[in-house]
Image (cartoon, helix red, strand yellow):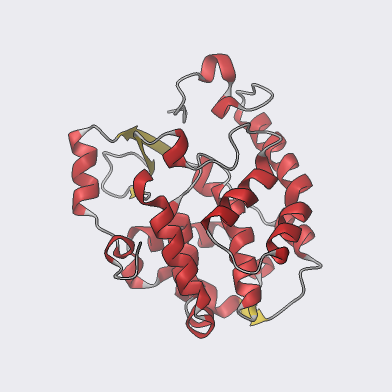
Amino acid sequence: MIFDPFGDFETAGYLQNALGLKDPNEVKQSEHLVFELGIEDAISFLSSLKSINYTSLLKVHELLFSDFYPWAGRDRHALAPHLAVFKGSADNPRHTAFEHPKSIKLAVDYALRLAADYENFKAKPGEVMGLLAFAHPFLDGNGRTILLVFMELAFRAGFAIDWARTDKDDYLYALSAEIGDPAKGYLNAYLKPFVVDISTRDQWPELIAGIKGLDGLDKENVSYGSLDDPEIQKIYAATRYYTSSDPGSD
């Protein structure tokens, strides 16, 4: 199933990309190229901010992907408010349902509040990363945008993740498990051995560009469906993540 939320894949290519590309390999290559070209601008932008908020996240996505996706910097709620997005098929009991479009900002805001508690954040880095991934703010480019914002948040909290020692498949497995059942702390358990002392931002562009599998939550087995579908409504009614009941939520 081709991810085609705009309904114009045949005429505009994958997600209305600037080159009209349809071939998955060509899309990945071109997308990653513009991502690499935008990393330094995105890092510079994040480092200049006094604080990081939802608008900051949107701007990072725009800086990274606007040369390939004209809609970069706009979230799912703005672009496809009628769609639910899943990792796996919606009729598979092992699928992962990402946040409802209306609650994307809520999930991100909650993650940012958790990250502001530096001591707790360092002890539970997977909780913040899991929430950002669960929010799945964008139609594509989530993994790379989220990672860059997460690295800046961690830098401000005085630590870093030694990503070079992580494994793509193990990380994505733990991340999917975290999204599916955040109470179990799967991603905390995976990331904690890789927590290291603070590092400078100098090596970030090379490090981030070399991390494999960052598009795993965007292009691997992603499906979608209408939020008007009664069966999909049941999924969201039955799965109330703690972000939606957080007493500090706006």
Report the number of numbered marks: 0
The reply to whether residue 206 is visible in this rendering is yes
Q: Position of residue 23 (x, y in %)?
A: 62, 25
Q: Is residue 241 left or right of residue 231?
A: right
Q: The N terminus is located in which quarter? A: top left
Q: Quadrant of residue 53?
A: bottom right
Residue pictured at 69% horizontal, 23% vertical: 19
Residue pictured at 41% horizontal, 69% vertical: 186
Q: Quadrant of residue 66?
A: top right
Residue pictured at 38% horizontal, 49% vertical: 98
Q: Position of residue 21 (x, y in %)?
A: 64, 23
Residue pictured at 67% horizontal, 65% vertical: 49
- Residue nearest the observer in this picture, 171 or 158: 158
- Residue nearest the observer in this picture, 149 or 179: 149
Instruction: Note whether 51 is above or below 239 in the view shown.
Output: below
The reply to whether residue 166 is visible in this rendering is no
Q: Residue furthest right?
A: 202
Instruction: Note whether 12 is above or below 88 in the view shown.
Output: above
Instruction: Note whether 1 is above or below 249 in the view shown.
Output: above
Q: Position of residue 44 (x, y in %)?
A: 76, 59
Q: The C terminus is located in which quarter? A: bottom left
- Residue nearest the observer in this picture, 114 or 12: 114
Q: Is residue 120 left or right of residue 239?
A: right
